Image (cartoon, rainbow, N blue to C red):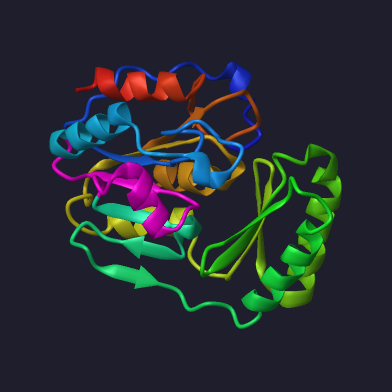
């Protein structure tokens, strides 16, 4: 299924059978509602309990694939998920605890300084530095969205960093592994190897994950509003996604 498939045509997914599945989950917008500021997302008892039970039910075939840093993902998930791909795939901790990490781009610091200078124009603009990437958030400054996206494109062109468009955020990242690469790497390793991958995500940054899951015999599930996507199914919101996963347990 191509990314041109309109989500308005997509059905809700059938009940999830965990026995043969590997479950890949985005974090923001999928496991947790989008917050105005990244630091406002905190641990949640319902989510923590769900992840613990999913990990047991899948015999560890559970991974979170997120744009957040590894430390931040562990904070929000209370360390309940062993396999995590962070910073959109630039950092990956496998199910056995092995860490795989790209080397930072030499012009990342320069890009961060440029974004901080840009953000100084409005108190609603936030810069988040992630070690291997830097993000400019403008959810609290929607009137700056067009200028922020244009500035992100210009800095990416000048520095050679990869531009990652997101939901009210422009992220400049070290070129390297993506969410798709992370799914493929997990699926080549135990305990994921041989399972059917299912990827849940909400944003354009998750399209790589949907494509990888489908290429490996599984499928993607879009969480949130209808939009063009490569996912096969759609769930309306975070609560619906959590409920769908809970129903499988």
Q: Residue at x 57, y 39 (%)?
A: 203
Q: Which of 70 and 174 is in front in this view?
A: 70
Residue interval drawn in magenta: 58-81
The quarter in which the N terminus is drawn is top right
Answer yes or no: is residue 155 visible: yes
Q: Quadrant of the C terminus?
A: top left
Horizontal side of residue 187 vs 147, given as left or right: left
Residue 201 on image: x %, y %: 48, 37
Q: Is residue 146 above or below residue 198?
A: below
Percent across and percent down for residue 34 are: 55, 34
User: What is the residue that sits farthest to the bottom in this orientation?
Assistant: 106
Q: Is residue 239 left or right of residue 167?
A: left
- Residue farthest front in this picture: 123
Find out whether residue 107 is within the magenta segment: no
Measured as percent of width and height from the top left, residue 235 is found at 48, 21
Point 13% across, 42% down: residue: 59
**Was residue 75 drawn as part of the magenta stretch in this picture?**
yes
The answer to whether any part of residue 20 appears in the image is: no
Is 178 in front, or is 69?
Answer: 69
Corner quadrant of residue 105: bottom right
**Tag count:** 0
Whether residue 146 is situated above or below residue 151 in the rendered picture: above
Q: Position of residue 206 (x, y in %)?
A: 52, 44
Q: Which residue is drawn at 81% across and 50% down?
A: 122
């Amino acid at each position: 299924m191509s990314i041109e498939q309109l989500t308005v045509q997509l059905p809700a997914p059938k009940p999830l059978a965990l026995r043969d599945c590997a479950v890949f989950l985005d974090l923001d917008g999928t496991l947790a509602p989008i917050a105005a500021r990244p630091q406002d997302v905190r641990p949640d008892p319902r989510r923590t309990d769900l992840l613990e039970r999913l990990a047991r039910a899948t015999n560890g075939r559970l991974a979170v694939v997120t744009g957040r840093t590894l430390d931040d993902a562990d904070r929000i998930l209370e360390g309940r998920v062993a396999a995590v791909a962070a910073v959109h795939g630039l950092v990956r901790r496998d199910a056995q605890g092995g860490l795989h990490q790209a080397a930072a781009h030499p012009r990342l610091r320069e890009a961060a300084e440029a974004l901080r200078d840009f953000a100084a124009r409005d108190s609603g603009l936030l810069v988040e530095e992630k070690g291997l990437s830097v993000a400019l958030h403008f959810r609290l400054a929607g009137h700056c969205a067009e200028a922020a996206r244009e500035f992100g494109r210009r800095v990416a062109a000048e520095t050679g960093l990869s531009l990652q468009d997101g939901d009210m955020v422009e992220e400049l990242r070290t070129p390297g592994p993506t969410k798709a690469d992370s799914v493929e790497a997990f699926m080549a390793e135990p305990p994921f190897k041989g399972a059917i991958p299912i990827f849940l995500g909400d944003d354009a940054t998750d399209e790589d994950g949907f494509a990888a899951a489908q290429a490996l015999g599984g499928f993607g599930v879009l969480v949130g509003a209808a939009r063009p996507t490569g996912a096969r199914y759609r769930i309306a919101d975070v609560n619906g996604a959590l409920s769908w996963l809970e129903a499988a347990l």
